[in-house]
Image: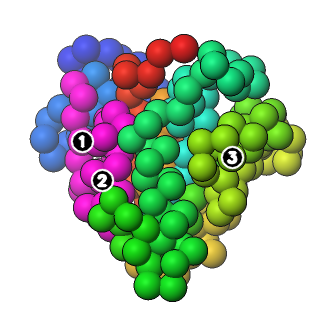
Amino acid sequence: MCPYSDECNFSYRCFCPHSKKCIRCEDWSCDTCRLHRLDGAGLVDLVRRLPATRLFLDFDQTLCSSKSGFPPVPGKHRLQEDVAELLRCAQRAGENEQGEGGGGWERSLRVSIVSRNPHKKEIMEMLQRRGIGDRVEVCCVKVERTTKVGKIADDMRGEERGAVAVYADDDVRELIDPTLTACSGLHRVIFSFRELTS
């Protein structure tokens, strides 16, 4: 049981029985629980280490410093640079027959941005300006009348058996949804945006 917050025990179920630590409150990660608390550099390391072939990202306060579903504004909002560079390298690897994407990235990584932010056009424009976007799917769940959990679970059912995926979001609610915790190849990341500034 989390000694810091009853919310973690009852609403969020973030307590790791293996290490006896709260993943949410103690900045802890557990490969066995497939639940991690990471910043941008930690997320990149996890994707490389697993190695993941699929990445799902929230947009606001995860990939971008934008908040509350407002459109990203050039000059005001910025992308989390460690993650943005991973996406650029993975995109180059997907375009290159040998799979080499630079930055030590040697395999294709399918990336989907799964967000409640409805401003798909502005999100795609921001990604294009930063050299990302041609091979990144943007799913604005409110517009597409689905949920983050529904989109990710559907995509995971379509993955090959044994595939490893990562889903990063700053909001723990979807990360602990039983539908996603049941996806055996899905590692979930409570994303810490502390290095992002608007």
> SS at mark 3?
helix
Percent position of residue 8, x then y: 37, 25
> SS at mark 1?
loop
Are the two marked residues, 1 and 2, in contact with CB atoms closer than 8 angstroms?
yes
Q: Nearer the viewer, mark 3 or mark 1?
A: 3
User: Quadrant location of the N terminus?
Assistant: top left
The type of residue carrying mark 3 is Gln
Q: Nearer the viewer, residue 9 or 173?
A: 173
In the picture, the disc for residue 128 is 3
What residue is at 43 percent from the left and 68 percent from the top? 101
Q: Which residues are magenta?
A: 26-51
Asked if residue 95 lies left or right of residue 145, the reply is left
Q: Earlier in the sequence, mark 3 or mark 1?
A: 1
In the picture, the disc for residue 174 is none
Q: CA distance from mark 1 to mark 2?
A: 10 Å
What residue is at 60 percent from the left and 42 percent from the top? 130
Percent position of residue 151, x then y: 69, 55
Q: Nearer the viewer, mark 2 or mark 3?
A: 3
Q: Residues within 10 Å of mark 2 (few under 14, many from 20)?
A: some
